[in-house]
């Protein structure tokens, strides 16, 4: 910076100290792959949406006419109202039981250091990384032996197996970011462990509970293998019924199946958007990385 004749310091021109933006091969490949993926995803969603609104399948990209009667027809044919109710019942029950069991577990793993803690965390990761069918068949066999197949309890039971470890892993970073001195101060003031947990920690963990709950609900709504193996005609969820409709593609109008798929995509997308509003995955990962160090 140079001084002027009046004694004032002259500021450098805007942008003088900025480095020129460089384009690398890695950046071009990364952004190109990202836009190809997003474009392909949007194209797939648009094709299903247009197919659910067409009056007659055409050879070109756009349908010859548009109508909404396929949604009403699929609602009657598949009983979408009953399917949505069953899906909501399963999802809400799984989320409630999962949070009730995952919160104290996550608190213990975040606050205490004991032999076998890392092994326990690895075991919680197993249902997330293994293919679902590797443990779905044994679980379904157990449910059939307990005579819980084709019941709401059986579907909830099999969905709890991957849901509880997932919620624990989500909640641990939220517990770790709370300063332990807050709990110590409450105990100094005479609060019992129950009061500390209910009146101090629980309000601070509301964002984590909401994030874990919504993300678990998204997983349950999209869970096909576990639900398919134990559900029946009276206990199907939306994703299982959609698979059954796709199997009958030669017997049902494809527009009806696409309308049902659009309802399923809209439901899942709405839940996912709510989850992303409640939690930033990159922030959670950053907190988790700091806690490991």
Image (cartoon, rainbow, N blue to C red):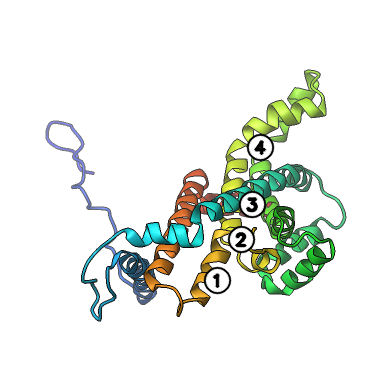
Residue 20 at x, y percent in the picture: 27, 62
Quickly name the residue at label 1.
244
Q: What whole-number distance in Å separates the C-alpha atoms at marks 1 and 2?
A: 10 Å
Residue at numbered disc 3: 90
- Say which residue appears at 24% left-offset and 71% top-offset: 63
Q: Position of residue 256 (x, y in %)?
A: 40, 67
Task: Classify mark 2: helix, strand or loop.
Answer: loop
Marks 3 and 4 sit apart, C-alpha to C-alpha, by 32 Å
Which numbered marker is on residue 85?
none
Q: Is residue 177 left or right of residue 75?
A: right
Q: Position of residue 155 (x, y in %)?
A: 70, 58
Residue 270 visible in the shown view? yes
Q: Are marks 3 and 2 in contact (CB under 8 Å)?
A: no
Mark 4, other Cα within 10 Å: few <14 / some 14–19 / many ≥20: few
Horizontal arrangement in the rendering, residue 249 relative to residue 179 (left or right): left
How far separated are the C-alphas under marks 3 and 2? 10 Å
Pointers 1 and 2 in contact (CB under 8 A)?
yes
Frontmost residue, 150 versus 212: 150
**Residue pictured at 44% horizontal, 73% vertical:** 252
Residue 178 — which label?
Answer: 4
Q: Quadrant of residue 227?
A: bottom right
Q: CA distance from mark 4 to mark 2?
A: 41 Å
The label on residue 236 is 2
Residue 7 screen position, x and y as percent:
17, 31
* Residue 293 visible somewhere in the drawing: no
């Amino acid at each position: 910076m140079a001084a002027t004749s009046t004694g004032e310091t002259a500021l450098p021109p805007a942008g003088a100290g900025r480095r020129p933006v460089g384009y690398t091969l890695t950046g071009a490949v990364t952004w190109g792959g990202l836009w190809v993926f997003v474009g392909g995803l949007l194209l797939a969603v648009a094709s299903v949406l247009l197919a659910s609104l067409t009056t007659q399948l055409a050879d070109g990209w756009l349908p010859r006419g548009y109508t909404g009667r396929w949604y009403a027809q699929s609602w009657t044919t598949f009983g979408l109202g009953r399917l949505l109710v069953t899906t909501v019942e399963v999802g809400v029950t799984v989320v409630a039981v999962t949070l009730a069991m995952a919160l104290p577990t996550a608190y213990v793993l975040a606050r205490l250091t004991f032999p076998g803690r890392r092994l326990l965390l690895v075991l919680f990761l197993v249902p997330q990384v293994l293919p679902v069918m590797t443990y779905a068949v044994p679980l379904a066999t157990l449910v059939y032996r307990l005579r819980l197949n084709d019941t709401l309890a059986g579907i909830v039971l099999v969905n709890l197996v991957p849901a509880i470890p997932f919620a624990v892993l989500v909640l641990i970073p939220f517990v770790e970011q709370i300063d332990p001195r807050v709990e110590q101060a409450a105990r100094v003031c005479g609060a019992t462990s129950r009061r500390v947990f209910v009146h101090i920690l629980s309000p601070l963990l509301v964002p984590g509970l909401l994030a874990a709950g919504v993300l678990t609900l998204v997983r349950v709504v999209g869970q096909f293998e576990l639900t398919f193996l134990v559900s029946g005609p009276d206990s199907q969820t939306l994703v299982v019924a959609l698979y059954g409709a796709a199997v009958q593609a030669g017997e049902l109008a494809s527009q009806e199946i696409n309308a049902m798929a659009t309802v399923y995509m809209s439901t899942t997308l709405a839940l996912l958007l709510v989850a992303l509003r409640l939690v930033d995955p990159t922030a959670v990962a950053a907190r988790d990385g700091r806690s490991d160090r």
